Image (cartoon, coloured by chain):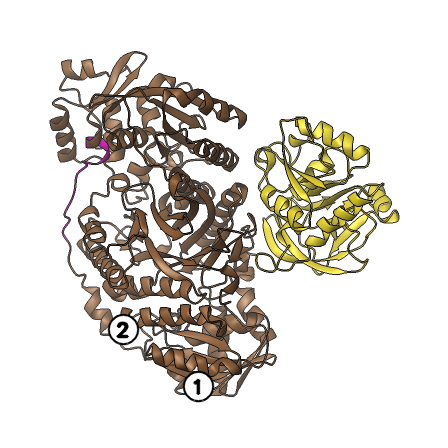
């Protein structure tokens, strides 16, 4: 099972995402933003970072990268796609997910170990969790406040498409403490915190993040 | 202004030149004329002025810094020593590590965000230039009083700048310092450390060898920012009546630097460069003259080929510009196509601007006219050297004679009050408000970061080889006794990596002082260098490089002498490191080392408005035995936790240990009025399982280190001689200070 990890100029967590995918038992394949070629992968991760320097808006330029055309097509065809942090921003800019990520309400970059509650385990990336499960993974962003209009929020909540929420104080001002959402089909997930930094207790606060990557292995085998 | 060429300089020898405005003294200007046998052209004058500035030429410090070489121990671990962009040490398994600290103090006062950001950018390029992938950064910072209005202006900007640039480069920030003192009010210190890793065979040097090889400039285009940065900003005292200095601060773009890093590493991996130099202080003047003098021949540069952000820049300005995110490489013609191809892949601007010659001159032309014709060494290395007058300042004997006369904490109430006050004082309070603005996780190899004693990163995922780094300075002790202060800072940094079980390997430094034209400051500097050189010799540690920042003073008030010492160590298996704190009850707590009545320069004394007395005398033999004990204890897995004692003494160390995992401790100590607050060096608190206590005692006996049982872990409080401080109360005191001040 091959998981593609896209590198845009300014991507930072690509090697971390590849390491996490490898730990979970998949084969990580590096994808270059400028190549419209998915190299036969079974799933794709858009990792964190500051692609194109976050110029204009986070993710606004990456969304037009040649590789994204293929990624969008594949996702619309049901391929599992995970956007982490900057990747989540790219997914929103690409309209694969609704809403937008805006500046943290306290206007600082914030890096901390963050508790989350998993609220949907029916997606390609969360099936290894149980609903209500509490996990701790790193959060690190400057523009992680999830915003959308009331109708969209009602739709996301009504359809159970919020996949994780922040527990405790709201770290960035996200509506309804939303940390991650999925599309209608459950194959595309956007997540602001970083599961790839929590795959073992040597380098991460916990190993809780690994289950996102083992989930997709199950999804791909199906 | 009309173009000033070498031909014109010969025919108009008496043209008046603004050497003084460019920071050159009359005798320095005369020396340039002597070297060239004529007056310099305006472009040559620009180059000499920036390269002979204090910042680039080390003209006041050179005679002292020599000791780092003269007193150095011979060690095979040192692969590249002082003089290159950064020193390189062998850490085993074929890996080499390079690390260095630099200051960006003055720019950060003028423009906190950009000053701090470009400080990070500059040191990262130094590390990259050695051929290494940068893997982590640290930032020792110093500010005026925490509640001073100007600190509220400067601190948030500097923190955001360090974070904004480092986070965007994808470099974990693994530690540093945040210290407040009134002498830093007009002179905040922004020191930035970067560490990088490479294979031995990948080391790159700044040399332009091989006639016919191409001089290639790549990275950002050149703009008008930072012109005169080193000569004006870093080498002169601020004067309230002077013109605004803002244009002299560089403006950084971390995205361009991130791309430059990846592009460069790909170029290095294919071995496409003969030599390389980054463009930092003194920009192209520095890069061309250093590359040329590092090689065997000369160099020709067509300056009009340099890509510009601002087409109106004059050749003098292009030579002096400190625009960020630029590199200069020497490339063999057969590799140039591939070099250009990789730059294209990363959308990096690249231009061939000249070539290496078999002559001996650095010749620079502007649209065909010769505007610079100099022996490159005279620009890069043969700058003026000053043996500045120095004299022991009057204050030393006076403050050394002062007696600290503050009542000591003796009763349970006084103990509790002292512990809570020390936990909350800005210098010792929780720094999460700062460090949570830095990414410590990126790259996925961070093993330790703030608030641990040292930062630690894994460099090999299979073997778990890692390196640990700590930076320390105790300016209070350096103020009382700069010779011992430097040795004590060295000992503390070495101890801080040893508590985790890493073995100290090499030293870097960033020496922050007032004006070298003040004999008292110069004496502080000379004593600090002598102390550090002697200390490194005694501990068998090579100094791999460093940085000097002078003129950190406002009017006649100099900053406290602040030699920041960085020590790098190696650990063969990061999985076996000793953590800083304990996460369970039932462990026994021991204090290693001797506690004397060392309150001079202590945080407790400072909190009570006193900073007199005598600094401790460093006992480096004992420090080395303690380090051996700590490394051996880690190797044999005796410790559950180990944490250094420094500012705030036992009180601060216990506070940090119990709060880390929210597990209390019950402590009983003798002579509490001293033991709780003394800052005697060479001490560590260790936690062990009761079954390991005998092994610990044996180890301490073997290394002749005093060991005292002080209590056990457990409970919801820190209890000291019956004074019960609940963890929630202690946490509140420790964590609310920064939130209140800056939140």
Chain part drawn in magenta: B378-389
Q: Is residue B304 magenta?
A: no
Q: Residues within 10 Å of mark 2 (few under 14, many from 20)?
A: many
Comparing B563 with B413, the one in front is B563
In the image, residue B425 sits, relative to residue B177, either above or below, namely: below
Q: Quadrant of residue B80?
A: top left
Which of label 2 and label 1 is nearer to you?
Answer: 1
Q: Marks 2 and 1, Cα distance to the nearest angstrom?
A: 25 Å
Drawn side of residue B546 relative to residue B11, left or right: right
Q: Quadrant of residue B107?
A: top left
The hue of chain B in the figure is brown
The reply to whether dot 2 and dot 1 touch (C-beta < 8 Å) is: no
Q: Residue drawn at (40%, 48%), measured in percent from left and top? A: B97
Tag 1 residue? B669
In the figure, the yellow chain has which letter?
Answer: A
Q: Residue furthest top?
A: B368
Tag 2 residue? B613
Q: Residue drawn at (17%, 38%), measured in percent from left and top? A: B384
């Amino acid at each position: 099972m091959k998981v593609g990890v896209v590198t845009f100029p300014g991507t930072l967590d690509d090697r971390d995402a590849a390491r996490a995918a490898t730990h979970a038992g998949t084969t990580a394949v590096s994808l270059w933003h400028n190549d419209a070629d998915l190299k036969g992968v079974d799933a794709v991760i858009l990792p964190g970072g500051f692609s194109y320097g976050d110029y204009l808006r986070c993710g606004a330029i990456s969304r037009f990268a040649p590789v994204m055309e293929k990624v969008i097509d594949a996702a619309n065809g049901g391929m599992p796609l995970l956007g982490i942090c900057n990747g989540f921003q790219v997914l929103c800019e690409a309209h694969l997910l609704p809403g937008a990520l805006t500046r943290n309400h306290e206007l600082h970059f914030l890096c901390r170990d963050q508790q989350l509650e998993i609220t949907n385990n029916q997606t390609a990336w969360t099936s290894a969790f149980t609903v209500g499960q509490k996990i701790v993974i790193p959060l690190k962003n400057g523009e992680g406040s999830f915003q959308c209009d009331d109708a969209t929020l009602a739709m996301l909540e009504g359809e159970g498409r919020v996949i994780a929420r922040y527990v405790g104080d709201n770290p960035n001002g996200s509506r309804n403490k939303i940390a991650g959402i999925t599309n209608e089909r459950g194959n595309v997930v956007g997540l602001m915190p970083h599961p790839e930094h929590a795959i073992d207790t040597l380098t991460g606060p916990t190993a809780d993040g690994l289950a996102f990557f083992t989930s997709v292995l199950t999804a791909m085998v199906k | 202004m009309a173009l000033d060429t070498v031909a014109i300089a010969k025919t108009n020898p008496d043209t008046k030149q603004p050497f003084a405005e460019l920071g050159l003294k009359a005798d320095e200007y005369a020396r340039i004329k002597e070297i060239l046998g004529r007056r310099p052209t305006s472009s040559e004058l620009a180059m000499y002025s920036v390269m002979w500035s204090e910042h680039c030429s080390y003209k006041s410090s050179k005679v002292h810094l020599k000791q780092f070489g003269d007193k150095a121990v011979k060690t095979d671990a040192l692969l590249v020593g002082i003089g290159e962009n950064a020193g390189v040490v062998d850490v085993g398994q074929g890996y080499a590590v390079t690390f260095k600290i630099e200051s960006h103090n003055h720019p950060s006062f003028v423009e906190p965000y950009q000053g701090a950001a470009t400080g990070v950018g500059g040191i990262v390029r130094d590390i990259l230039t050695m051929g290494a992938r940068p893997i982590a950064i640290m930032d020792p910072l110093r500010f005026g009083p925490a509640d001073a209005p100007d600190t509220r202006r400067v601190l948030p900007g500097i923190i955001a700048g360090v974070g904004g640039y480092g986070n965007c480069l994808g470099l974990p920030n693994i530690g540093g310092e945040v210290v407040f003192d009134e002498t830093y009010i007009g002179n905040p210190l922004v020191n930035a450390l970067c560490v990088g890793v490479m294979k031995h065979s990948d080391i790159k040097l700044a040399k332009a060898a091989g006639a016919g090889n191409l001089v290639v400039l790549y990275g950002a285009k050149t703009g008008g920012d930072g012109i005169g940065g080193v000569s004006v900003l870093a080498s002169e005292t601020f004067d309230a009546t002077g013109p605004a200095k803002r244009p002299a601060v560089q403006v950084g773009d971390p995205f361009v630097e991130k791309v430059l890093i990846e592009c460069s590493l790909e170029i290095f991996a294919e071995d496409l460069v003969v030599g390389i130099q980054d463009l930092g202080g003194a920009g192209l003047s520095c890069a061309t003259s250093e590359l040329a003098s590092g090689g065997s021949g000369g160099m020709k540069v067509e300056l009009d080929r340099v890509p510009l952000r601002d087409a109106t820049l004059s050749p003098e300005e292009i030579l002096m510009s400190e625009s960020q995110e630029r590199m200069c490489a020497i490339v063999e013609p057969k590799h140039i196509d591939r070099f250009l191809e990789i730059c294209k892949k990363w959308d990096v601007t690249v231009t061939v601007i000249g070539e290496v010659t078999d002559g001996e001159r650095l010749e620079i032309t502007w649209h065909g006219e010769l505007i610079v014709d100099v022996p490159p060494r005279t620009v890069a290395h043969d700058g003026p050297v000053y043996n500045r007058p120095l004299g022991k300042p009057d204050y030393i004997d006076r403050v050394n004679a002062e007696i600290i006369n503050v009542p000591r904490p003796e009763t349970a109430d006084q103990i509790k009050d002292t512990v809570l006050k020390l936990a909350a004082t800005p210098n010792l309070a929780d720094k999460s408000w700062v460090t949570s603005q830095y990414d410590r996780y990126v790259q996925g190899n961070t093993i330790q970061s703030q608030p641990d004693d040292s930062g630690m990163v894994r460099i090999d995922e299979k073997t778990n080889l890692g390196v640990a780094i700590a930076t320390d300075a105790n300016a209070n002790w350096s103020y009382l006794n700069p010779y011992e202060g430097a040795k004590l800072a060295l000992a503390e940094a070495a101890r801080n990596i040893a508590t985790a079980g890493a073995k100290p390997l090499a030293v870097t430094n960033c020496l922050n002082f007032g004006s070298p034209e003040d004999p008292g400051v110069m004496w502080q500097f000379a004593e600090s260098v002598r102390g550090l050189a002697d200390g490194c010799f005694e501990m068998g540690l090579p100094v791999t490089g460093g940085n000097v920042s002078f003129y950190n003073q406002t009017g006649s008030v100099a900053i406290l002498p602040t030699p920041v010492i960085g020590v790098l160590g190696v650990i063969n298996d990061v999985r076996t490191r000793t953590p800083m704190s304990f996460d369970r009850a039932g462990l026994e707590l021991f204090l290693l080392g001797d506690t004397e009545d060392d309150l001079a320069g202590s945080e407790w004394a400072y909190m009570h408005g006193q900073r007199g007395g005598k600094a401790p005398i460093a006992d480096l033999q004992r420090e080395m035995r303690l380090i051996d004990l700590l490394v051996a204890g880690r190797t044999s897995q005796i410790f559950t936790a180990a944490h250094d004692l420094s500012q705030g003494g036992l009180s601060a160390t216990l506070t940090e240990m119990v709060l880390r995992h929210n597990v209390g401790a019950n402590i009983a100590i003798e002579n509490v009025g001293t033991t709780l607050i003394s800052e005697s060096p060479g001490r560590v608190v260790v936690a062990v399982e009761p079954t390991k206590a005998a092994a610990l005692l044996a180890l301490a006996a073997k290394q002749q280190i005093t060991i005292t049982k002080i209590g056990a872990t457990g409970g919801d409080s820190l209890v000291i001689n019956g004074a019960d401080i609940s963890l929630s109360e202690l946490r509140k005191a420790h964590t609310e200070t920064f939130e209140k001040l800056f939140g």
